[in-house]
Amino acid sequence: MRLPAVLLVLLTLLPGASLAAPVETPSLLDRVRAGALPPVERRLPAAPYVDPVAGPGRHGGDLRLLMAKAKDTRQMVVYGYARLMCYTPELVLEPDILERVEVEEGRIFTLHLRAGHKWSDGHPFTAEDFRYWWEDVANNAELSPVGPPAAMLVDGKPPVFEVLGETAVRYSWEAPNAGFLPALAGARPLYIYRPAHYLRRFHAAHAAPAALAEAVEKARRRSWAALHNKLDSQYKNDNPDLPTLQPWVPATRPPSDRFVFTRNPYYHRTDAGGRQLPYIDRVVMNIAASGLIPAKTASGASDLQARYLRFDNVTFLKRGEEPGGYKVRLWRTGKGAHAALYPNLNASDPVWRALFRDRRVRRALSLGLYREEVNEVIYFGLALTGGNSLLPGSPLYDEALRQRWAAHDPDAANALLDEAGLRWGDDGLRLLPDGRPAELIVETAGESTEETDILHLVHDSWLKLGIKLHAKPLQRELLRNRIFSGQTLMSVWSGWENGLASAAMSPAELAPTSQQQLQWPKWGQYHETRGAAGEPVDMDSPRRLYALNDAWRLAGGPEERRRIWREMLEIHAEEVFVLGIVGGIRQPVVVSDRLKGVPEEGYYNWEPGAHFGMFRPDRFWLAE
């Protein structure tokens, strides 16, 4: 017998809430009068998402952004943040594109679409778009050689997929899949639908062979699958012909140094007054060298800018507020640590590898860090000191865990290193077990002076422990390859991507699940490749983290997931696998005086948050 359904959020409106009559968007009136576009009441879904926070705002205008690369067109998908499920700023997961979701036993998910919802070209958005992705893309060997995405597998098994009607689909796994809905709300979301009416023209199972062969040749692609994958670029957002559900539609083909995005006339959200969102008609993205973006922003060339701005730009940007016609806001970043040191537990050097696997050494290195000095000297005291852990914005936040083994205590650090057998040499440095002086090379991507400045201070702190730090800047790709291969002993990077986690969010980042986890890349690679590459985990605590991550996916309810999160956070606090230095750094967010609706305070983070996405830029509007 099935348990009663747990309805995460049934409706985007409270029961009995009334809809205001739809209001036509002024910039679309001429097209509507000419018959080129249906009136707004026929463009909206039968039950649109009514945003209780939006407005009242003014329709119209161009929003200017500055980006450094043509591939930054994907940022409009990040910022636009139209998702099947979305996070609110309170980190509550709610339906967005979906009208409602039913979850049974944590493993059966019934997704209900909004009747009458349409793609940006006016074609109906229906269950067929989900069926097409599942059967014709995810399970097509030529388009998806490795099969469906990992988020669609539980214990290596895919779900049973069912079409229940034009506006309902169901996914049923044999065991709970707690990560499924959060994956739909990601900054780079799990796309489980495609515009079937557009893409089937380029699919061997649906297109006329002669027409498909001609399209492949014209596009200069090696096969129909290569052409299909090139055109099927919802996240890259670089194909103006691909219908979308985002608030703004790309209108410029790359390459270009200026990209224009126009409003989606079939967008599914409105404000409480019946005005269809977004308020802003167009977004104009100008491409500039990344090093010039702070100066261009200060000259008033952007209406909303955070990308390519750093904390050390704040003083310069503040000076330009009045002449540039903008204000600088300082949002918190949401990573577990803005700057962190990663001892490589998979290092090829057997001596350093053994030392890094000794938690006394990791604790000593953490106690030797003078975090308050870093905060005062580089961040003017505005950052949060502590280890790599969750931030105050997280419902799981615990200050004691963040501060565990994070106090500046050189005496305790030296005692731990003595206990670990690192004796002192004659030149003021400790000696490794093989007799080498304790000189540690810390490698960095060298992309800003910020990391270099931090490492200078760490050098001085660790010298008191008898360990001499040498900073070695490298190109990012070379650095990552060296870490993956075990050549790098220690690296500097940011901490956990999600420092704002709730128990409903996946804790996979805390377990050895990815090669990108710089403290244990080979263990992560072993997981990602299902044992085909990398190395199996051979330490007790990381093994426990791995088991807990699996247990979270199968957990029966929120209390069990919270218990699992707590144990994983406790393990990290005790083991200090990553040496967090400072977190909660202030991100400069430059907002034009004419742009309204942008929060004064917020978190600027990739996951969760999608940078501006969680605050819904379709709510932002331009004053006359």
Image (cartoon, rainbow, N blue to C red):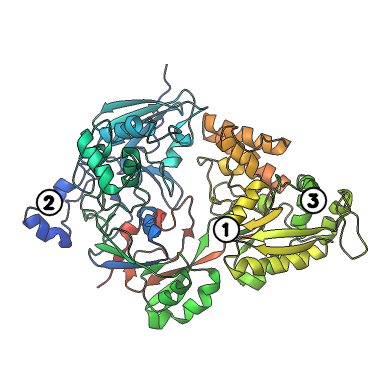
Name the residue carrying label 2: 39
Q: Tell me what residue is drawn at x 75 percent, y 66 percent.
A: 459
Q: Tell me what residue is drawn at x 82 percent, y 58 percent.
A: 438
Q: Residue furthest bottom?
A: 323
Q: Is residue 99 left or right of residue 602?
A: left
- Considering the numbered disc 1 on the image, is that residue within a helix, a strand or a loop? helix
Identify the amino acid type marked 2.
Pro
Q: Is residue 418 left or right of residue 515?
A: right
Name the residue carrying label 3: 361
Q: Quadrant of the N terminus?
A: top left
Question: Is 396 or 183 nearer to us in this picture?
Answer: 183
Q: Residues within 10 Å of mark 3 (few under 14, many from 20)?
A: many
Which of labels 2 and 1 is toward the front?
1
Callouts 3 and 1 close, C-beta under 8 Å: no
Instruction: Estimate the x, y position of residue 384 in percent, counting from the top left.
Output: 62, 62
Identify the amino acid type marked 3.
Val
Residue 50 in sight from this viewpoint: yes
How far is mark 2 from mark 1, CA to CA? Answer: 50 Å
Instruction: Estimate the x, y position of residue 601 in percent, counting from the top left.
Output: 46, 63
- In the drawing, what numbered circle is on residue 476? 1
- In the drawing, what numbered circle is on residue 611? none
